[in-house]
Image (cartoon, rainbow, N blue to C red):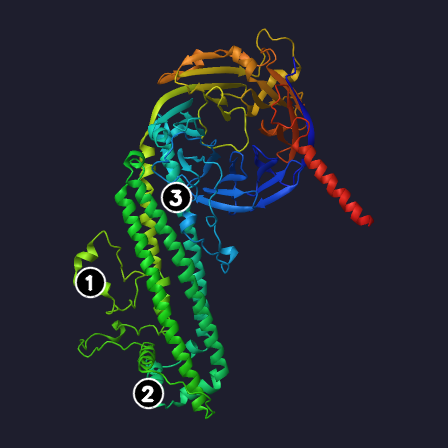
């Protein structure tokens, strides 16, 4: 048998863990693999580990890995329904998605090259918002361990789809990893939902259809769904997805700022709780305000107050508390004035742009509802008003606390009969503000004289919670409940007077509503819900546009077992597949196994002729096959992947027998160019049964079709990359990784480095580093 390819061993290494998934980067010498512990490790071709990403939880398995085309971004699907986007270059978690079901597979599509342009309707300058919006300041005071998966910026690489396939049969499409660009439930398109399993779902090369390989009863089917919205609205979707990514980044920034606000507010409360609040809680309700008000009006202090000021608190201790509280309040004020206000302005800008897109009905009619976009913009404006309201409330609290601290210091000095160097004289407004601040520490109880005396004491309402020196005026905004102390209306503001005198202004959609009962948390959630509603229409429009065009029956499967087996066995079905887009021939290629010894290679044309080419091969020798090695008579498939459009890499294994209890493994490089002479050609129909219309050929009978290479150990998994010219196999119970460099005897691409591989570059860098260290040691 002629050898159409050769493999050069690069190296092998016993791993310290069980490797369950592995994937080569398309451009760089990086391989990612998931371990049995749920970790994701990225290493170079020379075995150098780049980064290790920890598991997102206990007993979580890595279901799927996929590199973004020509980028350092890696998508990971976990068994607990999480999808994480990891950046190997910055060694950070970019973002994350959470679903309520186990994940079958996640992958990035090829890069989108959209021909339609919107230059005359939209801004064609990338990230034009940076001209008008100031850059959001970093949140340096947030605890890194509190940051969740969805905190960083979204990737800015080549535009593509992220496809998430659930084991339940639901498939989600995300454009740029941000915009929910439709979903489909495959269980709605099958005849036997009780015997259903999805193997793979792929976007076609034109991004207007999907292929779904699944089990329907005892049939292995390939369903072809066309979608006209994806075909007609790709360019508007890219515009909308870019703004959706900016909006999600801003939402994450607002959530981060909210976390910082909560931490700063807890610091203020802790400072006050040290001694002031502890003393207040030890007194009878109503006595604190009365005693302080008596001290403020008459200048006389009770024995309890004097004991607290001189023995417990002291002048020095109070100044320390005052400085700490003032510093914490200033940090809180800065977060609201700079970070939170800036994020609200950014959000309003992006929503305003989307509302403008909605008016271009020619492009965005199927994607944006103008009324919903305007309502989201109004909700964002209401959030901005609430931020300003919180800012004014903090300013008032800071002003009152400064007055209170100054008065307490002067009073303590005066009562201790010390010399007062500079007596601060409060103005009439300051005296009034200070008196209101002291009275509001313990609000007066409602008059209960008119109530029925027959009401038992147990049913009487409990005393109100003691105020922490009026700090709850700010704290109420950071709770998910209605405000207990709404901000008083400023009668000096003309706008407030107009709203009070004209109810039509408050109900007009042209003006932003200002709900003074909502807290900041409630207003934020209301804005987020309105924003989510904006992106419901793209999902609904695209999801409703999936139409089943073709159903291709690829083979027959045994009945599904009630209990899934962890280890593969010949008594159950074995289906694995690989997908490749052949741009030059304008076709989509799908390779799949239909049994342990038989596989199909399907080529579906996208040129409009609706042709399907099928190459059906088996590992068993045919009736006219020449004498082979004894191992070749009982081979079965273990894994297969497209090496490129001309070659298919297969991993085969001998079946165990009494004479040979330990199986042998073979790497098979199958030439698709040679096999195309044996293919059959079909016209696509609504329902096709390929098993009756195709002929199976032995892989050994195709001239120059297959090259076999024996492998060490029992190999169970394969990962190849034609652009990198490498292949990796796992053996010895997925603990030994062996890497080969492939040398296909085809026309060499001028852009490829034929003389120096990345391995040689890596070796040179290692040798150079070693020589430098030796020179330093000698010196």
635 or 151, nearer to the observer: 151
Q: Residue at label 2?
A: 297
Residue under the point 41% across and 19% down: 607
Residue under the point 39% across and 43% down: 243
Q: Residue furthest bottom?
A: 417
Looking at the image, tell me whether mark 3 or mark 1 is earlier in sequence order.
3
Label 3 neighbour load within 10 Å: few <14, some 14-19, many 20+: many
Residue under the point 34% across and 42% down: 535
Is 89 located above or below residue 346 in the figure?
A: above
Instruction: Please name which of the two marks, 2 or 1, marks the residue nearer to the observer.
Output: 1
Residue under the point 76% across and 45% down: 772
Q: Residue furthest right?
A: 778
Instruction: Please name which of the two marks, 2 or 3, marks the residue nearer to the observer.
Output: 3
Q: CA distance from mark 3 to mark 1?
A: 36 Å
Whole-percent x, y for residue 750 in the image: 61, 24
Residue 182 visible somewhere in the drawing: no
Whole-percent x, y for residue 192 in the image: 36, 26
763 or 306, nearer to the observer: 763
Q: Residue 219: name its quadrant.
A: top left
Q: CA distance from mark 2 to mark 3?
A: 58 Å
Q: Secondary structure at mark 1?
A: helix
Looking at the image, tell me whether mark 2 or mark 1 is earlier in sequence order.
2
Q: Residue at label 3?
A: 244
Whole-percent x, y for residue 761 in the image: 68, 35
Q: Secondary structure at mark 3?
A: helix
Q: CA distance from mark 2 to mark 1?
A: 39 Å
Q: Residue 569: name its quadrant.
A: top right
Name the mark on residue 498.
Answer: 1
Label 2 neighbour load within 10 Å: few <14, some 14-19, many 20+: few
Whether the residues at callouts 3 and 1 have beta carbons within 8 Å, the answer is no
Whether the residues at callouts 2 and 3 have beta carbons within 8 Å, the answer is no
Whole-percent x, y for residue 189 in the image: 35, 27
């Amino acid at each position: 048998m002629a050898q159409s390819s050769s493999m050069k061993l690069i190296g092998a290494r016993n791993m310290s863990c069980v490797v369950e998934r592995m994937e080569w980067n398309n451009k760089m010498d990086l391989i990612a693999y998931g371990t049995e512990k749920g970790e994701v490790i990225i290493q170079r071709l020379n075995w150098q580990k780049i980064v290790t990403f920890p598991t997102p939880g206990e007993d979580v398995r890595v279901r799927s890995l996929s590199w973004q085309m020509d980028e350092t971004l890696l998508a990971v699907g976990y068994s607990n329904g999480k999808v994480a986007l990891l950046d190997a270059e910055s060694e950070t978690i970019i973002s994350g998605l959470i679903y309520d079901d186990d994940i079958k597979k996640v992958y990035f599509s090829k890069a989108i090259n959209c021909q339609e342009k919107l230059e005359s309707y939209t801004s064609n300058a990338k990230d034009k918002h940076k001209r008008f919006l100031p850059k959001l300041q970093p949140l340096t005071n947030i605890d890194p361990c509190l940051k969740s998966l969805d905190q960083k910026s979204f990737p800015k690489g080549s535009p593509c789809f992220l496809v998430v396939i659930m084991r339940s049969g639901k498939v989600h499409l995300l454009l740029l990893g941000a915009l929910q660009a439709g979903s489909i439930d495959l269980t709605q398109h099958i005849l036997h939902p009780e015997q259903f399993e999805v193997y793979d779902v792929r976007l076609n090369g034109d991004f207007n259809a999907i292929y779904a390989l699944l089990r329907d009863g005892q049939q292995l089917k390939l369903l072809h769904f066309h979608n006209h919205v994806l075909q007609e609205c790709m360019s508007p979707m890219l515009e909308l997805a870019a703004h959706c990514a900016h909006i999600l980044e801003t939402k994450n920034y607002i959530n981060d700022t909210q976390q910082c606000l909560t931490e700063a507010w807890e610091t203020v409360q802790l400072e006050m709780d040290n001694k002031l609040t502890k003393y207040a809680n030890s007194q009878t309700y109503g006595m604190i305000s009365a005693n302080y008000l008596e001290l403020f009006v008459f200048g006389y202090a009770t024995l309890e107050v004097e004991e607290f000021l001189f023995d417990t608190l002291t002048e020095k201790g109070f100044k320390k508390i005052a400085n700490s509280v003032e510093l914490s309040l200033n940090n809180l004020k800065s977060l609201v004035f700079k970070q939170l206000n800036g994020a609200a302005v950014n959000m309003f800008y992006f929503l305003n742009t989307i509302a403008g897109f909605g008016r271009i009905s020619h492009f965005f009619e199927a994607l944006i509802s103008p009324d919903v976009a305007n309502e989201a913009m109004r909700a964002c404006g209401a959030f901005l008003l609430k931020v300003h309201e919180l800012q004014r409330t903090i300013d008032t609290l800071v002003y009152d606390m400064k007055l209170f601290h100054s008065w307490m210091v002067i009073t303590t000095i005066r009562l201790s009969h010390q010399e007062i160097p500079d007596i601060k004289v409060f103005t009439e407004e300051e005296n009034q503000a200070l008196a209101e601040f002291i009275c509001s520490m313990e609000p007066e109880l409602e008059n209960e004289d008119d109530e029925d005396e027959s009401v038992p004491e147990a049913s009487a309402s409990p005393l109100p919670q003691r105020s922490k020196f009026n700090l709850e005026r700010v704290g109420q905004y950071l709770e998910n409940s209605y405000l207990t102390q709404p901000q008083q209306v400023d009668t000096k503001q003309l706008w407030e007077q107009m709203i009070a005198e004209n109810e039509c202004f408050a109900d007009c959609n042209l003006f932003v509503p200002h709900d003074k009962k909502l807290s900041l948390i409630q207003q934020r959630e209301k804005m987020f819900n309105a924003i989510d509603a904006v992106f419901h229409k793209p999902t609904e429009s695209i999801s409703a546009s999936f139409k089943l065009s073709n159903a291709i029956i690829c083979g027959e499967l045994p009945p599904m077992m009630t209990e899934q087996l962890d280890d593969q066995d010949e008594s159950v079905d074995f289906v694995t597949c690989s997908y490749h887009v052949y741009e030059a021939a304008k076709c989509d290629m799908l390779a799949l196994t239909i049994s342990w010894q038989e596989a199909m290679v399907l080529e579906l044309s996208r040129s409009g002729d609706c042709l399907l080419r099928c190459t059906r091969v088996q590992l068993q020798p045919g009736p006219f096959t020449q004498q082979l090695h004894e191992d070749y008579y009982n081979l079965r498939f273990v894994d297969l992947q497209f090496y490129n459009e001309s070659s298919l890499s297969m991993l085969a294994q001998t079946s165990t027998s009494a004479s040979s209890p330990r199986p042998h493994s073979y790497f098979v490089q199958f030439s698709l160019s040679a096999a195309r002479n044996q293919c059959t050609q079909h016209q696509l129909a609504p329902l096709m049964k390929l098993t009756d219309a195709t002929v199976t050929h032995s892989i050994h009978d195709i001239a120059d079709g297959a090259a076999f290479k024996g492998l060490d150990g029992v190999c169970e998994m394969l990962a190849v990359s034609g652009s990198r010219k490498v292949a990796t196999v796992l053996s010895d119970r997925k603990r030994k990784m062996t890497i080969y460099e492939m040398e296909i005897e085809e026309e060499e691409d001028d852009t490829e480095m034929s003389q120096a591989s990345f391995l040689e570059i890596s070796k040179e860098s290692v040798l150079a580093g070693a020589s430098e260290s030796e020179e330093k040691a000698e010196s």
